[in-house]
Image (spheres, helix red, strand yellow):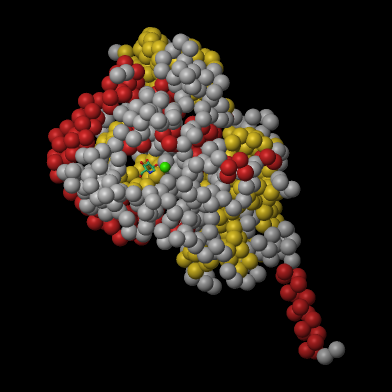
Amino acid sequence: MTKRILLALLLLGANMAASLAQPFSKTVVSPNKSIQATLILNEKGEASYKIRFQGKDVIGQSRLGLRLRGYDLTTGLKRISDSKSSEKNSWKPVWGEVDEIKNEYKTITLKLVSAEGLRFDIVFRVYDDGVGFRYEFPKKDKTSEIVVLDELTEFQMTADYTALWAPSDWDSNEHTYTKSKISEIDATKHLTDIEPFVQHITNVHAVQTPVTLQGQSGFCMSIADAALVDYGAMHLEFDRTTRTFKSFIIPTADSTVKSINKLPFHTPWRAILLSPDAGGLLTNHLILNLNEPCKIKGDLSWIKPQKYVGIWWELHVGKSGWNYLDKDGKPTGKHGATTENVKHYIDFAAQNGFAGVLVEGWFEGWEDWFNVMRPEIFEFTKPYPDYDISEISRYAKEKGVKIIVHNETGSAIRSYERQMDAAYDYYLKYGFNAIKTGYVGFIQPKGEWHDGQEMINHYNEVLRRTAEKHIMVVAHEPVRPSGLQRTWPNFMASEAARGQEFNAWSKGNDPSHELSLIFTRLLGGPMDYTPGIFQMELNQFDKAKKDRVRTTVAKQLALYVTLYSPVQMAADLPENYEKRSDVFQFIRDVPTDWSDTKILNAAIGDYVTTARRQKNSDNWFIGSMTDETPRQFKAKLDFLDAGKNYEATIYEDGKDAHYLDNPYPVNIRKLNVRKGQTLAINLADGGGCAISIKAVK
Ligand code: NOJ
Ligand code: CA
């Protein structure tokens, strides 16, 4: 054997040894020791993890990794180093369900290098209420850009949990929810009775996130995106053979590419919310804690939690229309956003203490907009001739009310991006500092998806640009929220699910719908659901209309407390409120910003009773609601301050109330109460109960 061959053999041996990674396994335990996350690297250089909660494996050993163009981060990985650290502090949200949030966790960072020499980290944070992890590419390395072809993160379910899920649609999240065993997840049924206008469902065993799971013991887990920035949304494909949810990132227009990112870069957090029971899921702050602190500097007093009314429901029930002209180019005579009508809503808002009036259909482009969706459709600074914006601005100022400016984009996002700076300046000139965006229809340019990276960047760009200009945002049809309201507190709410509007023109929302929303979609952030409908049959203006709202009136009141948002609409028409001013009093009274929240009882998709303390006040409000099953509860008022007297006003389902054929009776009664007392709550089928508890001097 020549020296050369010997040397070559020696080098080969050294390489082989180097390609076998040193197996690695380290466990991080949450501050209160209830959660353990173990990070593993096997001898083939494959990364994985598992999660234990309260002494039980809740996520079995599950794969981690990404496939990038030119780099395989799923195998052949080598550990450079690992380190542990911890954090303990708290922070105060600008608005929210509580006034202070504890942020305490332990971290493990595993520094790795791929076979091709690309460095990256896997970072796990273990909190008392869940686990977050992500992939980080800390600095410019062998490359300045990475192209993600696939994320291979998995979540192996250790039992056939019950899941509350909605189908994975790349383009719409306005679907109904189903409760089933995970092994029975199947969107075939949704495909037959689906109503959203845009759908792109490629895998009937896949779900959107957040998806919520419950084990036999009652423990609950939800899997979600946190801080979804510059990346497609994570959906989950369920593999029945391995009982595993596999992440599926919604692609870019190039279906082989999930995302393109400049270094430094990190993926969104994969958040696993954990709670011993259903109620705990509703006070879980993991998603918010995984988001970056507020990025808006200086005075934030322009950000105002508020209630609003508006020219909205009347458009959906056919009293008036968005468009000014008819098909023949003549005024319809039914246009909703007229100066006179807006003034009527301004008066109603001012009389009842609402800060905002939403106006839809005020700018050019609504003529047959739904059928003629095209890349340039709306003109965001061109009011219709019967909308006198200066006069409306003057009148609104006089009455101390602000217009919430509607910006339906028809998903023509390039056109909106070109117009938005000029549009925002134009609105500010008139004193309007809140917008409602909308993304109805297919994304134009074609090929992008509502949940894909391009659109995620668009939604975030709107938040940045409006924050700079001190404008609040409510977004309709964006991706589901991922806690970004912590970073951008001007992001007041989004729809991002099937809202109240579906009751006006579809088979509607069934009585469990809002109870599904709070345990899934709402976990990522507030929802502009638009509660407060008093007139349940929707044939007031069109006798042929069969649509109806399937809740009792008392349940509509309860939604103001149970379905959290810092902006809440009183969605029905002023005339419908004027007819029931005693019941409307609850909507007048209920605030939208809270210093504390207690869940008195809860079952996923079935019922909830929520008590919240008004910010800077001694007053409390309770909302309780049920699905189609009537229920009786006892609410113990042990959260009230000792020694104080309170007056409770109870708005409950009246005699024989029923969501289908008798939704209207509301019984209103008053009681003096003190800490420790118990209130009886009786909920009708599809019913609810709303209670204001005011401290008495
Ligand atoms: C759908 C939105 O959810 C709704 O609120 C709005 O009225 C219509 N699009 C028109 O923009
Ligand atoms: Ca919508």
Query: How many marks overall?
Result: 0
Residue lying farthest right? 1
Q: In the figure, residue 111 lies in which quadrant?
A: bottom right
Would you place residue 115 above or below residue 491 in this image?
below
Q: Nearer the viewer, residue 638 or 217?
A: 217
Residue that appears at 73% across and 74% down:
15
Q: Is residue 582 visible?
A: yes
On screen, residue 502 versus residue 342, left or right, reads: right
Image quadrant of ligand 2 equals top left
On screen, residue 95 versus residue 381, left or right, reads: right
Residue that appears at 40% across and 12% down:
667
On screen, residue 239 versus residue 3, left or right, reads: left
Would you place residue 138 above or below residue 90 in this image?
below
Quarter of the figure with the N terminus: bottom right
Q: Nearer the viewer, residue 25 or 461?
A: 461
Residue that appears at 23% across and 32% down:
345
Q: Nearer the viewer, residue 189 or 29?
A: 189
Would you place residue 540 above or below residue 366 in this image?
above
Q: In the figure, residue 569 lies in which quadrant?
A: top left
Q: In the figure, residue 472 lies in which quadrant?
A: top left
- Residue 677's spot in the image, x, y percent? 46, 11
- Residue 4's spot in the image, x, y percent? 78, 89
Residue that appears at 52% across and 19% down:
685
Q: Is residue 592 visible?
A: no
- Residue 675's spot in the image, x, y percent? 44, 13
Q: Nearer the viewer, residue 132 or 564?
A: 564
